[in-house]
Amino acid sequence: MSDVAADVVVIGAGIVGAACAWVLARDGVSVHVLESGVPGGGATAAGMGHLVLIDQPEAEYALTRYSRDLWLQLAPAIPPEGEFRRCGTIWLAAGEEEYEAARSKHAWYGEHGLRSELLDSAALAAAEPNLRAGLAAGLLVPDDAVIYAPWVTRWLLQRSGATVSFGAAAVAVDGSGVTLADGGRIVCGAVVCATGCGATAMFPDLPLRPRKGHLAITDRYPGFVRHQLAELGYLKSAHGESRESVAFNVQPRATGQVLLGSSRQFGDESPDVRWPVLSRMIRHATEFMPALAGLQVTRVWTGFRAASDDGLPLIGPYGDAENVVLATGHEGLGITTALATGELVAAHILGREPAIPAAPYLPSRFGVRVNA
Amino acid sequence: MPENIAVKVNGVAVLVAPGTSAAAAVILAGFAACRASVTGAPRAPLCGMGICFECRALVNGVAHTRTCQVTCQPGMVISTDAA
Amino acid sequence: MPREERCRILIVGVGPAGIAAACAAAEFDDSVAVLDDNPAPGGQIWRGEENPRIAQLRDSRARVFSGTRAIAPLGGGSFLAEKDGEPVLFHYEKLILATGARELFLPFPGWTLPGVTGAGGLQAMVQCGLPIAGKRVVVAGTGPLLVAVATHLRERGAMIEAIAEQAPRRCLLRFGAELWRAPGKIVQALGFEWTLRGVPRFTDAWPIAAHGENCVKAVLLETRRGARLFPCDDLACGFGLVPNVELAALAGCELHGGFVAVDEWQQTSLDGVLCAGEPTGIGGVDRSIVEGRIAGYAAAGRRDRARKLFAARRRLHAFSAVLTRCFALRDELRHLARADTIVCRCEDVPLRNATEHPTARSARLHARCGMGACQGRVCGPALDFMLGWTEPAGRARPPLYPVSMATLAAACEEEPTHV
């Protein structure tokens, strides 16, 4: 490829890169996207597509609230193949301690103008008959939703009108552009790096680690589950540092298939299924939902979340290079926070005030430096 | 002489020879299709060997059973999407 | 706790290759187990049929686990299978993969109508009780299987309206001329010809469309003299065989040209994992039996016995090469489907949605092509042929077949090491 020019190059066409491309293009920027594989084929394809409000820490709350609102505004435009469903989340409280946690959350949400409903044991059973009896309570968050992220990624990319180079791998980034593996160069005003775990290939000092997860999807069982179900304990698993954990996380897909997560492992970079982890994830799930046991699983796969050292994403300039912008490290919230990430990236590049404070996500908080 | 086996397909009683598959029982009971595709088209077995999944039906309460891989047993209850 | 079975030699698949491997191994090893999804031994070609080799298997020391579906190798000499919705964990030292082949289905308008089946598929269904006497059947596609199936059906009272072979006439003549390599086949072929006397036979012929509302009523065949319509009750249509290499790929065996690479002892690229029969190269029953025996003897440590079969195997490999050349698929078959013809039956994906994508993975993620219960076994090989996609190993993911959550939950009872 001979030298090409664009205002902005976005490296990586996962949901975060696609969202960045879409927002920038909407704001009048000429965008060139580089994708070495299938758009939405990386961590995006290994996510659950859950658009979820997370209430802590504060910075995660701000980002997920902002992004969820953006998704809800975009929803009417998403075609059926994007499988947008405002099915809501029910956070499950297994016992009394979690019931207390659910009550406080419910109160807190009310104070912050967010809709939620506390379901006692009976109401929970009515809402989700396939859950086991005896769960203490559930916190229903009706404005949470799900999408089929790989398709939405491709849709955002097409909607952006950006030039996309498939099979193109960027090997180096500097102040004036991007160098490709085939020797070609794209001259641009700014570069956005949205390559997930791959960001450390280009910037080895980034505090990112791959966090492996397993998923399983079933044949079609319409009506088996109606809301995204997650245990309150999920929040500990996601934010914890433990080497290996599982949490109950189940989702109805528009097709009637049931999608099951989740597991987290550090230190295993093979895409192979780890049977002990998968088995444990499923056993744990059947404790919450015994009827899962009889469902037919048609596929099992793994993926890698880009996890930063403090659990918050890296959105903002890389070290001193104002025009090299990172958009990575989203751990399990890349799909939820993709749109907000796009807005923050665009705000930085176009020099305007972002809708939420950008400080908590700046890579500079880690003292990240440009390689000399 | 081994006795014929009584099964029900969509409520219709049929007697089949021992060794008859549930898929064949569906045809013998007069139904051309085992299932409806995701867009509602009638579908019947294609491969006859358990890999195409077009022959799926509800068999003795178990959904998504491949009827070509199941041999009829006395009292078996088969329901296709037509039911 | 899942049911556990231990053996020295585990054989997956009990068709001709698996039966041969089991009998050979069991001559010298008392710890041989065979597992297979089908209700009874025999694979596809001997489905529902009593056969001296099946009797030999029954009389051998090998333990046969029928109705047992292979789910995944778990590593460390463990193999997960499922029977009646319950897990069965096999522990083995040596593994022989004898997973056979399936028919290649090519899409064309109307191919999803009830009554359109595979060629071997229809024979299998008839073996399992499907009524065929008095039914009008058109047999189409390619390969010696067509004639064998048509004969089988006619013997059971079916009216064979036409046999349409896509290969050019000169290829069939060449195939006939090469039959001296397998003398037993000459007698068999003459028998078929006698049974099929009077049946309209076509070469350079293939289905253009199947017509009907809720089931097939007629087939339009392309022939050298133009398109001809054949009213029928069944269309039995198979375009050759696709090796079942998914388990080998899942286990990590190397593939060459879409087949499992094996050495002279039928050993794959993985130590202790052997492969015999169609997954190493399409070649029919005789080749499967010889390769199965070699694998069985080799796994049981009797290479001397295995070596005696090398000459027979060489001859059968030469015959396989003839088969492949004579029945190669012609280019016209890539273009039978129209833009609105369903190519992925599980998810009802039309061809136009699939052609937007350069790879099978892209089509799966974005068009749901191959995301259904058959896990791409039907649409995958068809689209590989039609669109030049190449990803046979990439399609291999666990589970090998749909499996209950309960079985996956029980696969590994031990708590994983964690902080």
Image (spheres, coloured by chain):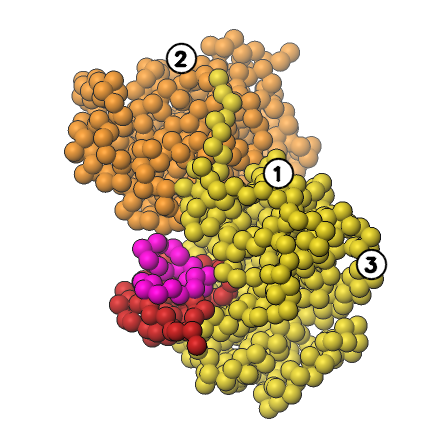
Chain colours: A orange, B red, C yellow
Residue depicted at x 70% and y 42%? C272
Q: Looking at numbered disc 3 in the image, what kind of residue is underneath it?
A: Lys
In the image, which is nearer the foreground, mark 2 or mark 1? Answer: 1
Question: Which residues make up the magenta segment?
Answer: B55-79
Question: Residue A238's quadrant in the figure?
Answer: top left
- Pointer 1 indicates a residue of which chain? C
Q: Specify whether A143 is left or right of C396.
A: left
Q: Are marks 1 and 3 on the same chain?
A: yes
Identify the residue position indicated by label 2 in the image. A359
- Alpha carbon distance from label 1 to label 3: 29 Å
Mark 2: few, some, or many residues within 10 Å (few <14, many ≥20)? Answer: few
Helix, strand or loop at label 1? It is loop
Which label sits on residue C338?
none
Q: Looking at numbered disc 1 in the image, what kind of residue is underneath it?
A: Gly
Q: Looking at numbered disc 2 in the image, what kind of residue is underneath it?
A: Ala
Question: Residue A73's quadrant in the figure?
Answer: top left
